[in-house]
Amino acid sequence: MNILIIGSGGREHALAWKMAQSPRADRVFVAPGNAGTAADAENVPISAEDTAGLIQFAKQNNVGLSVVGPEAPLAAGIVDAFEAEGLRVFGPSRAAAELEASKVFCKDLLRKADVPSADYHTFTEPRQAFHYLQEREDAPVVVKADGLAAGKGVIVCRGRDQAIDAVRTIARDREFGDAGNRLVIEERLDGQEVSVLAVTDGKTIVTLQPAQDHKPAGDGDTGPNTGGMGAYSPAPLVDDAMLHWIEEHVLVPTIHAMKLARRPFAGVLYAGLMITNQGPKVLEYNVRFGDPECQPILMRLKTDLVDLLDAAVDRRLDKLDPLEWDPRPAVSVVMAAEGYPGKYEKGRLIRGLDEAAALPDVKVFHAGTKQTDEGVVTNGGRVLAVTALGETIARAKLQAYTAVKCIRWRGAWCRKDISDKALALSR
Ligand code: AMP
Ligand code: GLY
């Protein structure tokens, strides 16, 4: 079977690398891909937003399964468009992708389904939001733009003054455009964050091993938010009993509520959870694999990913054998461009990739990279996700950073403490 993966980040490289290992995979295409996917699969110069171009390519190249990486094409209805043309595609419909694309929709659904989450209010008028903030006690809140804002539309506030500023930014200055047409103001939760991803066909849920991301740019979770500076899996914070609890009280009622809302959900349901003193609560849903969580998760998955995603598309996940995992933990360290998450330059020559790749139990997933005549150059803010397996989290961390040390370009940087949270727990 020919496979088409849509997107160009570290997640898509991990998907392509893993799916290309399947005996069922003939050609694996990535559109538009990066220098890493060009090495492990075949790049196709079509943008992830060019639905018509992708459909035409899938038809002409006998693609039997397409997998959509990022949220924007899902929210724009790429799955509906593929299905209308009779093409098999893994991912949620536009109506189901609302779970990520609208925070108001998500919060209302969680409330209806009685899934634990932060208390919230929604607003369409900034005036009402200001009034609400003036009237309530001065407590920490989180102000969120309703729509997709590349992870930036969420402002965590210490108290009223910051919250008022946040409402101004989103609703009056319209920093995130139409994404700020509606607002959510919710209670701020305290605890550690984990990501629990599940593959579902709308009937059966196959939960993947939990992972932990590192969103802030600086060591010790300081500095501005990023797309994610590193991840590890499993997350020792979530033991089997808690994972089971999350399935029962979070994932199952959500899938059920989506069915009742006539928006059956198939694809990856990614719960961003806060583990609070009162137990796990949902911070948000994503409707796709997490980046960088996907990288350590897929490095550990032994089950054939083509079998898994294919079964989801055919709605026969109930017939699939239980997933098999490498028991060893995996740690993924993101190497970023100078200036990221602010402004950064592209086109810097990357050295040492072969040296890093030669290390045992290491895979260097590419994100913002491009192949040129001179070699591989940087082409984005998050450039690489250097991922390693180890007998323990400490060993996996050491091996990942050993690989990081092999790789150089002008201005390259990374967090130095990826997985330390897990180490603190296992001490
Ligand atoms: P979201 O896009 O909704 O996941 O929010 C992005 C980040 O904001 C999350 O990963 C959390 O770090 C933080 N966040 C969102 N909602 C809350 C909340 N209710 N309490 C504390 N932090 C939050
Ligand atoms: N790792 C965060 C995300 O994929 O949204």
Image (spheres, helix red, strand yellow):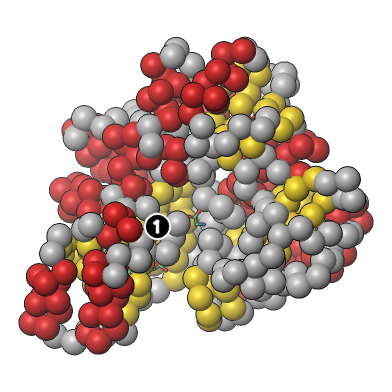
Quadrant showing the C terminus: bottom right
Residue 121 can be seen, yes or no: yes
Label 1, ligand 1: CB separation under 8 Å: no
Q: Is residue 340 left or right of residue 317?
A: right
For mark 1, does the 10 Å Cα neighbourhood hold few (<14), some (14 to 19), or many (20 or more) residues? some
Provide residue 109's location: percent of width, then percent of height: 21, 47
- Viewer-side residue, 124 vs 405: 124
Q: Residue at coordinates 49% horizontally, 71% vertically from top-left?
A: 225
Helix, strand or loop under label 1 = loop
Provide residue 277's location: percent of width, then percent of height: 33, 73
- Viewer-side residue, 360 vs 5: 5
Q: Residue at coordinates 64% horizontally, 73% vertically from top-left?
A: 339
Q: Residue at coordinates 61% horizontally, 12% vertically from top-left?
A: 60
Say how many tags the image has: 1
Q: Is residue 409 left or right of residue 319?
A: right
Q: Quadrant of residue 151?
A: bottom left
From this view, report whether residue 128 is shown above or below residue 91: below
Provide residue 164's location: percent of width, then percent of height: 23, 80
Provide residue 354's location: percent of width, then percent of height: 90, 52
Q: Quadrant of residue 93?
A: top left
Quadrant showing the N terminus: top right
Q: Is residue 272 left or right of residue 17?
A: left
Q: Amino acid at mark 1?
A: Ala
- Viewer-side residue, 270 vs 40: 40
Judging by the rendered image, the residue that carries numbered circle 1 is: 149
Q: Quadrant of residue 167?
A: bottom left
From this view, report whether residue 401 is shown above or below residue 259: below
Q: Residue at coordinates 53% horizontally, 80% vertically from top-left?
A: 223
Q: Is residue 48 left or right of residue 335?
A: left
